[in-house]
């Protein structure tokens, strides 16, 4: 059986990466109460920009996670453009994050690492 997937990216800091590693790279941790939306991004360039410009200044390091999710699941969420045309995200309500995790195909992959020493 061939499952159609969509590739998404998630910029994270070191604390979120630790929680992802604790899951065996199988899912994302629950959102904090002040984080009502989980927003994976649609392209690597935008994920790298967030990791460098937001995660590194906030915590000293940033990482880009690549993952595949069932296309049939991802299609439930409209693509949001939040800046220029490369700034595209899916907005998944925090309460639906467990369902997103169940629709991930394969492991989450760390594909880029950024630190304050690289700046």
Image (cartoon, rainbow, N blue to C red):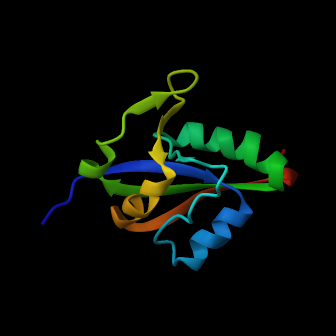
Judge by depth and name the residue closer to the eye, 74 or 105: 74
78 vs 80, left or right, is: left
81 vs 34, left or right, is: left
Residue found 82% across the figure and 49% down from its top: 58
Where does the image place residue 48, in percent across and percent down from the top left?
63, 43
Where does the image place residue 105, in percent across and percent down from the top left?
33, 64
Location of the N terminus by quadrant is bottom left
Where does the image place residue 45, in percent across and percent down from the top left?
56, 38
The image shows a total of numbered marks equal to 0
Residue found 55% across the figure and 51% down from its top: 10
Q: Classify 90 as above or below 111.
A: above
Location of the C terminus by quadrant is top right
Where does the image place residue 97, in percent across and percent down from the top left?
45, 58
Residue 118 in view in this figure: no
Judge by depth and name the residue closer to the eye, 119 or 38: 38
Residue found 20% across the figure and 59% down from its top: 3
17 vs 107, left or right, is: right
Q: Residue furthest left?
A: 1
Q: Residue furthest top?
A: 84
Residue found 71% across the figure and 57% down from its top: 13
Which of the 4 image quarters holds residue 50?
Answer: top right
Which of the 4 image quarters holds residue 111?
Answer: bottom right
Q: Classify 84 as above or below 60.
A: above
Residue 54 in view in this figure: yes
């Amino acid at each position: 059986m061939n499952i159609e997937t969509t590739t998404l990216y998630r910029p994270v800091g070191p604390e979120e990466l630790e929680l992802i590693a604790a899951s065996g790279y199988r899912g994302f941790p629950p959102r904090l109460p002040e984080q009502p939306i989980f927003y994976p991004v649609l392209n690597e360039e935008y994920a790298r920009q967030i990791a460098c410009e937001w995660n590194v200044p906030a915590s000293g390091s940033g990482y880009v996670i690549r993952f595949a999710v069932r296309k049939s699941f991802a299609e439930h969420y409209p693509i949001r453009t939040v800046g220029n045309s490369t700034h595209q995200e899916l907005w998944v309500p925090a309460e639906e994050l467990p369902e997103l995790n169940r629709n991930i195909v394969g492991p989450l992959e760390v594909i880029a690492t950024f630190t304050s020493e690289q700046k």
